[in-house]
């Protein structure tokens, strides 16, 4: 079904992604999966934090409310939120991030609708793009106010259930799902959403889940981003053939070299190419996301020329199961501050009473608003564990509402280097993030992020409810 050209492109893509911390990848055409891959310790059966892919889902909720006649994109924000709106921002301004604020303003602005609406924009309203999480946070509040329920509850019967997307958690902020970030999806959830968009709003089983006008608006409405991109990169003329964030931003999606895409930090991507029906869904944790996009877009022509598959998942899909540990030498620490490891220990198993077969035991103390736990590590396989809060503790440092019974599911693996250094990777599997933990020959311990969690680079930021730690379910 896939053909030799696609198989060759697929193999090249897998090799190119190794070392970029890939987690999961699905390539589909017209609703049929052509290929899928996972990189241990990640798997496709658990939902993970997809960062600003959340913005695309919020935009879909807004557009669905418009299709039901419950709001208009030309509405001023204060028509739906009881907040002053002295600069006359409309819902369309928020959707296209063209409030007139500069990137300097939006990058330091808290995710607070009142602050966004009251801050005088540097440029005339509607004339300039600046990436703005506060704008999408405000849209999430609008969805909540107009629908009278959380965005996921509103989308559940309209979109999520029909696409086979089961219960998913969206991190709340001030009692409302964040909108701009915090949504947890599986890579297959992303692929299902992308397939419906590529098909004009029709699910693979033929069910219409989005009005055609919604998808058309999503696919054709874009504001220029090259000027802001040039400012961010100190370049007057971005290479729009290669700089994928300089091509335009629409209703919660980015314009792409072909089609458009959902786009989250560190490389949570869903490429949607309506012309050919190709969808590429990806989760990973790359510092160089442009390199990842180049690899993913390289799959599109070969997938577009593959067999005319349609309908259910193909039994002939290419499947690859790889291990990120193989590329461990290529994972380097980010410039985020090292974690405070006071009280942490990484002991040899013989000295720590660790489980049989373990090489080391990592102990992370809980307390002071931080989760902790014990994980036994082996050199030949990933082991799994859970970091939990101390009873009665409230997580510190996370810009969101407390997570009752929150946990950080982790997978870990370690090795001893020739000089006696012990190197361990501790992966927070419900997120894109991993810690690089090192015990020097003199016993000194350090822990650095490979890619640091946004908002607050702490383990507490990654707490999730048990729902997320468990394998993802379909609709009930």
Image (cartoon, grey):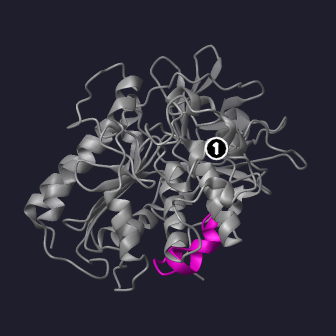
Q: Could you tell me which secondary element the residue under label 1 belongs to?
A: strand
Q: Magenta region: which residues?
A: 151-171
As for residue 292 lying within the magenta part, the answer is: no
Q: Position of residue 185 (x, y in %)?
A: 52, 61
Residue drawn at the location 78% of the way across and 36% of the way down? 365
Residue drawn at point x = 48 percent, y = 17 percent: 419
Name the residue tied to disc 1: 376
Q: Quadrant of residue 276?
A: bottom left
Q: Nearer the viewer, residue 405 or 268?
A: 268
Horizontally, is 435 left or right of 85 in the view?
A: left
Residue situated furthest left in the rendering: 4
Looking at the rendered image, the quarter that the N terminus falls into is bottom left
Q: Nearer the viewer, residue 260 or 41?
A: 260
The answer to whether residue 282 of the structure is visible from this angle is yes
Q: Position of residue 124 (x, y in %)?
A: 49, 35
Frontmost residue, 241 versus 413: 241
In this picture, residue 263 sits left or right of residue 148 = left
């Amino acid at each position: 079904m896939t053909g030799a050209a696609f198989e060759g492109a697929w193999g090249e893509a897998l090799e190119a992604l190794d070392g970029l911390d890939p987690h999961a990848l699905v390539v589909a055409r017209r609703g049929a999966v052509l290929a899928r891959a996972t990189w241990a310790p990640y798997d496709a059966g658990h939902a993970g934090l997809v960062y600003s892919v959340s913005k695309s889902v919020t935009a879909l909720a807004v557009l669905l409310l418009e299709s039901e006649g419950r709001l208009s994109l030309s509405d001023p924000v204060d028509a739906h939120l009881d907040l002053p709106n002295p600069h006359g921002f409309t819902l369309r301004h928020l959707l296209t991030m063209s409030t007139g604020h500069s990137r300097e303003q939006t990058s330091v602005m808290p995710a607070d609708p009142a602050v966004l609406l009251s801050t005088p924009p540097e440029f005339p309203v509607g004339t300039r793009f600046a990436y703005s999480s506060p704008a999408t946070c405000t849209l999430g509040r609008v969805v909540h106010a107009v629908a009278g329920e959380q965005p996921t509850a509103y989308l559940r019967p309209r979109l999520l259930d029909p696409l086979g997307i089961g219960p998913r958690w969206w991190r709340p902020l001030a009692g409302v799902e964040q909108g701009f970030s915090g949504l947890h999806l599986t890579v297959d959830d992303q692929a299902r959403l992308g397939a419906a968009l590529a098909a004009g709003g029709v699910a693979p089983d033929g069910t219409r889940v989005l009005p055609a006008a919604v998808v058309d608006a999503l696919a054709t409405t874009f504001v220029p981003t090259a000027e802001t991109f040039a400012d961010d990169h100190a370049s007057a003329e971005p290479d729009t053939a290669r700089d994928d964030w300089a091509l335009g931003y629409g209703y919660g999606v980015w314009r792409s070299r072909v089609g458009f895409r959902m786009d989250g930090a560190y490389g949570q991507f869903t490429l949607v190419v309506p012309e050919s029906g190709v969808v590429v869904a990806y989760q990973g944790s790359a510092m160089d996301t442009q390199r990842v996009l180049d690899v993913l877009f390289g799959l599109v022509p070969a997938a577009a020329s593959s067999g005319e598959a349609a309908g259910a998942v193909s039994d002939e899909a290419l499947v690859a199961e790889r291990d990120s540990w193989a590329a461990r030498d290529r994972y380097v620490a980010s410039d985020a501050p090292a974690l405070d490891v006071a009280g942490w220990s990484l002991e040899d198993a013989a000295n720590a009473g660790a489980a049989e077969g373990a090489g080391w035991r990592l102990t992370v103390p809980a307390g002071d608003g931080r989760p902790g736990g014990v994980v036994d590590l082996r050199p030949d396989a990933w082991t799994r564990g859970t970091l939990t809060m101390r009873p009665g503790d409230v997580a510190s440092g996370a810009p969101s509402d407390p997570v009752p019974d929150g946990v950080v599911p982790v997978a870990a693996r370690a090795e001893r280097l020739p000089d006696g250094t012990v190197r361990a990777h501790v992966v927070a599997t419900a997120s894109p993030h991993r810690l690089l933990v090192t015990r020097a020959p003199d016993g000194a311990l350090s822990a650095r992020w490979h890619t640091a969690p946004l908002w607050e680079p702490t383990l507490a930021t990654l707490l999730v409810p048990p729902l997320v730690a468990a394998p993802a379910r379909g609709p009930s």
